[in-house]
Image (cartoon, grey):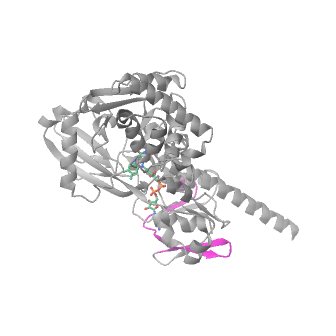
Amino acid sequence: MNDVLIMGGGFAGLAAATQLAAAGRRVTVLEKRPVLGGRAYSYTDQATGDVIDNGQHAMMGCYTETFGFLERIGAADKLAVQTSLRVDMLDPTRGAGAISCPPLPNPFHMAAGVLGYRLLPVADRVRVLAGGLRLLMMKRRGDTRLAALTVDGALDLLGQSPAARRAFWHPIAIATLNEDPAIASADLLATVMVRAFFAGKDAARFVLAKVGLSELYTDDARRFIEARGGRIETKAHVVGVGFRGDEVSHFELRDGRRLTASAYVSAVPPQGLFPLLPIAVRRSVPALGGIEGLTSSPIVSVHVWFDRPLLAGRPFVGFIGTGTHWAFNRDVIGGRRDRDGGYLSFVISGARAIVDDDNEAIVARTLADVHRLVPESAAAVVRHTQVVKEKFATMAPTVAAARLRPATVTPFDNFVLAGDWTDTGLPATIESAVMSGHRAADVVTARLAALGSRGRETRAAS
Ligand SMILES: Cc1cc2nc3c(=O)[nH]c(=O)nc-3n(C[C@H](O)[C@H](O)[C@H](O)COP(=O)(O)OP(=O)(O)OC[C@H]3O[C@@H](n4cnc5c(N)ncnc54)[C@H](O)[C@@H]3O)c2cc1C
């Protein structure tokens, strides 16, 4: 029998599997798709031969669980880490500016970065800094108002002007929460402030993968697991979770197999898990029944190959006041400065309003935004485009969602939950996924150790 069955081969499932394998447990990962990687994967674009991500993923220096996972599987050197936080921004009227933080002790690095941000009038820079520090204190002191506030509601409370929202708060909130600030949770934004921007200069740095997302972690994780006697099954679609009494009895696969183990981990999104749960379980366990109420927020990525390099060698740039939020310079990030073309990847977060539009319309709007903010792009020829729509990109981080995120442990002794959407206290990100996987592995390890010692006690008594 398997020690542990893990349903889902994304960051959460692979983090759990590798931690358990490192502890000597026999794990089997069941992934329904032909490839590992879940919502963070890459593939080769047929027209250009370039490896493209399903959407640009940015990490930060505070992603300690993620770095632990990547170090475990030997992949940490595939990351490029900023020396200190620098975010270049483009504004249609005020031009280019940057939040550039010198290597000073916390919070002086952020103070210097915000006070030097030329896209805001000086009075607004001071207001942003004071607002950021106040939000930080509210979170640290456990101010209960945060749980009920949206980002915009909190910005009202903090006296932030429209200009400060447009050029500072909204770009940060949309990028880190993937949601409209009018409905996104202020508590999660405060968490980002505490963990990333005001946790020291190293925590605030941006971290990007130098390779395609799949190459970043899936093959190395597979090798790590298999080298320790574990198994990865792709095209292994779990269609049912069997329950007996206060335990899970098996995972049922689409091909008819019923697999059993000492412990079971679900590392799939809520909309994947909910249909697998028997109605009686959904009704009797509010924490599991409630996950039906979690909704998703889409991300649309527009990949454009121009005939010349753009963005003046910058790895990424934030757009202010446009429907397109970020431009990532894939040639610079991937170390392809030798190329004559400019492969840029544009991100539209919280993209509910456009996710169902035609690709042509999405590309046209993106290019109009680019021409507005990067005027030299108007003379560039577009050689090729690709649009990737992720309708279920991340859990919508609304105020209501916070109450519905379930914990790692369930009332079923041998069944635990992982996934970026579970109650890690973080926005639904890679770091949340990996943290949830590690927590699941901790709970399973403790349970298997207890089972082992109980087995030894039983043998000793007989
Ligand atoms: C376009 C885009 C951009 C993003 N940008 C960022 C970013 O910049 N920074 C950041 O930190 N995060 C970002 N994220 C979020 C990040 O990708 C996710 O938080 C993370 O990948 C979630 O990992 P997970 O393992 O929890 O879930 P998933 O990646 O969804 O993994 C779940 C796996 O379970 C499998 N599965 C589902 N049902 C079953 C079943 N019944 N049987 C077997 N297998 C099943 C799925 O196929 C999938 O592989 C982004 C996401 C998207 C889509």
- Asked if residue 57 is positioned above or below residue 287 in the image, the reply reads above
Q: Quadrant of the N terminus?
A: bottom right
- Asked if residue 148 is positioned above or below residue 90 in the image, the reply reads below
Please give left or right for residue 113 compared with residue 277 in the image.
left
Whole-percent x, y for residue 448 in the image = 70, 60
Total labels drawn? 0
Q: Quadrant of the C terminus?
A: bottom right
Q: Residue at x 19, y 53 (%)?
A: 361
Question: Is residue 443 among what the camera can see?
Answer: yes
Q: Nearer the viewer, residue 435 or 461?
A: 435
Please say whether residue 248 is one of the residues in the magenta stretch: yes
Q: Nearer the viewer, residue 49 or 199?
A: 199
- Asked if residue 56 is positioned above or below residue 3 in the image, the reply reads above
Q: Residue at x 35, y 27 (%)?
A: 120
Ligand 1, seen in the image, is in the quarter at: bottom left
Q: Quadrant of residue 87?
A: top left
Please give left or right for residue 46 compared with residue 113 in the image.
left
Residue farthest to the right, as pictured: 461
Q: Nearer the viewer, residue 425 or 458?
A: 425
Please give left or right for residue 333 compared with residue 402 in the image.
left
Please give left or right for residue 39 compared with residue 61 in the image.
left
- Asked if residue 418 is positioned above or below residue 383 in the image, the reply reads below
Please say whether residue 29 is one of the residues in the magenta stretch: no
Q: Residue at x 61, y 75 (%)?
A: 243
The stretch in magenta equals: 225-253
Q: Nearer the viewer, residue 206 or 111?
A: 111
Question: Is residue 83 among what the camera can see?
Answer: no
Whole-percent x, y for residue 417 in the image = 57, 60
Whole-percent x, y for residue 315 in the image = 32, 33
Q: Quadrant of residue 242?
A: bottom right
Whole-percent x, y for residue 392 in the image = 39, 58
